[in-house]
Image (tube, rainbow, N blue to C red):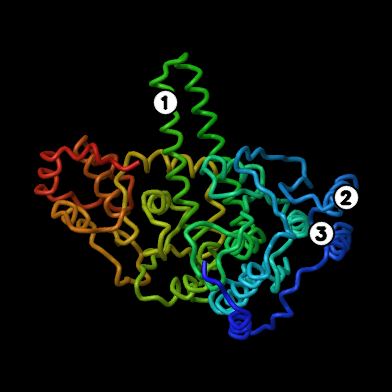
């Protein structure tokens, strides 16, 4: 991490339109005073029970680090992933990094975020100058949406992530990206708070988040029932656990292309609502105006379009190469737990698409320069050419599926059946025994 000087700090502040004196955290006494005022509100959808209010304020006043919200009736066990927000330990540079990121986000969100998201930003009044203190932020979120925060120390397993969602808890990290950094592969406060919090006020998005948690519960309840039926067969149990994890991977793709990286039409223009996009000023501009990525119109209420999401692989190491755009938020309400589960089950047995390609039947808004043809991944694999992990994973999975046999009836689940893989590729693949390279 670079060592920044006072002159660097002043330059960062000036470039982002504020002064260094704006980066001044409130004292514990002032934070408690604001918390007391917030918790006394009755003009909110979910007022705080007086008994819970007293205990909550007492914990904050004592200086006890925030762990997990306890203003509702639900709780969640995070195990080794549980963390605490030691607010007093944040450095000036970390607060400054937050202030710079939020200032940059405000400019791009104003231009590219949908109205519903911008309204959510106004409702929560996230501090511009310093990192938010989770006691106060958690109270505001709960009173407006019945969701709460659960602090974690790193990216948590998908199963635990969606378990939290099923109980209306959102996992948040406590670290802030280095000063001057736009995009991170792993979520920080800049993503979790400045990206996600406003989306809780978009009811369709919040519902989809909870529906994914409930889909997780269906998957693992069925797994546990089947495990009980096999009566201790270790190999069968291992396979059942692997299948459940695999199903959740496909459900996670639906989440990725909607909650994290979704776009929506608004007054005839494409606008952002995905938290993964809006937490990065660079990707916010790129997602709407960039020439590299594809933009495809999608209807989540259509089973074939839902499979398009579930069967599209992606990477987290760089900006997305395909974005899916919905006509309106009402379509998201169709993503019930049962539909997410059914789509995941089908997707597991069907060929995948890469994050770069446009496939038959797509309603294309923009074709990006990163676009590849459907069969390019197979030819490049056969030729030993360099390609990204997404293309490699997809090519190997599909070749294994076709080798084992895929019926036209199964493929007809797609909006339009994919083109058959060229015979020279399948012959090469079968001869070279690529099954050992199967993706995870």
Number of the front mark, 2 or 3: 2
Q: Nearer the viewer, residue 3 or 332?
A: 3
Mark 3 or mark 2, which is nearer the start of the sequence?
A: 3
**Residue drawn at point x = 62 percent, y = 37 percent:** 79
> Do the residues under discs 2 and 3 have CB atoms within 8 angstroms?
no
The image position of residue 130, as x and y in percent, is 70, 69
Q: Residue 238 shows which numbered tag?
A: 1
In the picture, measured across the screen, residue 258 lies left or right of residue 94, that is left
Q: Does dot 3 land on a helix, a strand or a loop?
A: loop
User: How far separated are the C-alphas under marks 3 and 1?
Assistant: 47 Å
Which of the 4 quarters of the picture holds residue 196?
A: bottom right
Which of the 4 quarters of the picture holds residue 35?
A: bottom right
**Residue drawn at point x = 51 percent, y = 44 percent:** 158
Q: Residues within 10 Å of mark 3 (few under 14, many from 20)?
A: few
Number of the front mark, 3 or 1: 1
Number of the front mark, 2 or 1: 2
Q: How crowded is mark 2: few (under 14 residues within 10 Å), some or many (20 or more)?
A: few
**Residue drawn at point x = 56 percent, y = 36 percent:** 217
User: How far separated are the C-alphas under marks 2 and 3?
Assistant: 22 Å
Which of the 4 quarters of the picture holds residue 249?
A: top left
> Do the residues under discs 3 and 1 have CB atoms within 8 angstroms?
no
Q: Residue 58 shows which numbered tag?
A: 2
Mark 1 or mark 3, which is nearer the start of the sequence?
A: 3
Q: Residues within 10 Å of mark 1 (few under 14, many from 20)?
A: few
Q: Above or below — where is 70 with respect to 197?
A: above
Mark 1 or mark 2, which is nearer the start of the sequence?
A: 2
The quadrant the C terminus occupies is top left
């Amino acid at each position: 991490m670079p060592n920044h000087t006072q002159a660097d700090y002043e330059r960062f502040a000036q470039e982002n339109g504020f002064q260094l004196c704006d980066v001044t955290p409130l004292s514990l006494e002032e934070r408690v005073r604001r918390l007391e005022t917030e918790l006394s509100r009755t003009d909110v959808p979910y007022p705080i029970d007086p008994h819970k209010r007293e205990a909550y304020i007492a914990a904050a006043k004592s200086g006890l680090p925030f762990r997990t919200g306890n203003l509702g009736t639900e709780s969640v066990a995070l195990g080794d992933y549980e963390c605490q927000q030691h607010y007093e330990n944040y450095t000036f540079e970390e607060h400054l990094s937050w202030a710079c990121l939020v200032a940059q986000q405000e400019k791009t969100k104003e231009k590219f975020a949908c109205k519903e998201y911008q309204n959510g930003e106004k409702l929560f009044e996230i501090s511009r100058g310093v990192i938010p203190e989770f006691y106060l932020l958690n109270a505001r979120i709960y009173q407006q949406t019945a969701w709460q925060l659960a602090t974690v120390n790193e990216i948590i397993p998908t199963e635990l992530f969606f378990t939290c969602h099923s109980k209306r808890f959102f996992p948040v990290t406590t670290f802030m990206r280095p000063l001057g950094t736009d995009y991170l592969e792993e979520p920080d406060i800049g993503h979790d708070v400045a990206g996600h919090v406003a989306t809780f006020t978009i009811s369709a998005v919040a519902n989809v988040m909870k529906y994914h948690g409930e889909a997780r519960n269906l998957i693992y309840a069925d797994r546990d029932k089947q495990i009980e039926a096999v009566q201790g067969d270790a190999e069968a149990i291992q396979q059942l656990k692997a299948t459940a994890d695999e199903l959740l991977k496909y459900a996670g793709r639906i989440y990725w292309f909607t909650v994290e990286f979704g776009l929506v039409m608004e007054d005839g223009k494409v606008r952002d609502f995905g938290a993964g996009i809006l937490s990065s000023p660079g990707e916010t501009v790129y997602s709407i105006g960039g020439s590299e990525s594809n933009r495809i119109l999608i209807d989540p209420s259509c089973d074939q379009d839902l499979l398009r999401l579930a069967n599209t692989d992606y990477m987290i190491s760089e900006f997305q190469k395909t974005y899916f755009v919905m006509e309106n938020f009402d379509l998201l309400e169709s993503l019930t737990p049962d539909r997410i589960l059914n789509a995941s089950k089908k997707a597991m047995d069907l060929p995948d698409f890469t994050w770069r390609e446009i496939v038959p039947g797509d309603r294309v808004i923009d074709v990006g320069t990163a676009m590849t043809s459907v069969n390019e991944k197979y030819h490049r694999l056969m030729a030993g050419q360099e390609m990204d992990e997404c293309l490699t994973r997809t090519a190997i999975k599909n070749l294994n599926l076709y080798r084992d046999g895929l019926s036209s009836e199964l493929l007809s689940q797609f909006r339009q059946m994919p083109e058959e893989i060229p015979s020279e590729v399948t012959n090469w693949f079968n001869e070279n025994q690529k099954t050992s390279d199967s993706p995870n």
